[in-house]
């Protein structure tokens, strides 16, 4: 049974208190406590909003390729797929 929920995730440095990103997610989740299914939906929505053309226009294509490698590594680790490499 899905429920509509809202939560905020922040990332930054505990030592300095600097926050690098804050994301608020709202939607339906079938996981009442953890909401991992909703997190995946949010990640997919954010990834689908990226246009590589804008990286090229700003001369940041190398950064884009480094970032996509981080996304792939992080996704593998989140789902335990890095254990099979």
Image: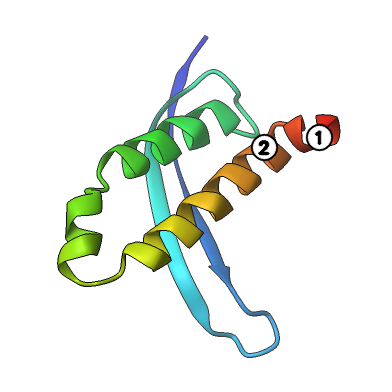
Nearest to N terminus: mark 1 or mark 2:
2
Q: Residues within 10 Å of mark 1 (few under 14, many from 20)?
A: few
Instruction: Assign the C terminus to one quadrant of the image.
Output: top right
Q: Residue shown at 44%/40% (left/top)? A: 43
Q: Is residue 51 left or right of residue 75?
A: left
Q: Secondary structure at mark 1?
A: loop
Q: Secondary structure at mark 2?
A: helix
Q: Residue shown at 68%/80% (left/top)? A: 14
**Residue annotated with mark 1:** 85
Q: Is residue 50 left or right of residue 80?
A: left
**Residue annotated with mark 2:** 76
Q: Which of these two is toward me, 33 or 36?
A: 36
Q: Residue shown at 61%/40% (left/top)? A: 75
Quick check: 39 above or below 73? Answer: above
Q: Is residue 5 left or right of residue 78?
A: left
Give how far across and how far down residue 35 sits, in percent: 57, 32
Pair 1/2: label in front: 1
Q: Which mark is drawn over residue 6? A: none
């Amino acid at each position: 049974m899905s429920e509509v929920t809202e939560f905020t995730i922040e990332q930054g440095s505990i030592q300095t208190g600097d926050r690098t990103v804050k994301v608020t997610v709202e939607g339906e989740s079938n996981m009442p406590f953890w909401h991992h299914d909703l997190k995946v939906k949010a990640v997919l929505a954010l990834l689908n909003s990226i246009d590589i053309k804008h990286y090229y226009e700003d001369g940041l294509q190398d950064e884009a390729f480094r970032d996509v490698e981080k996304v792939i590594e992080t996704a593998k680790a989140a789902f335990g797929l890095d254990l099979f490499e």
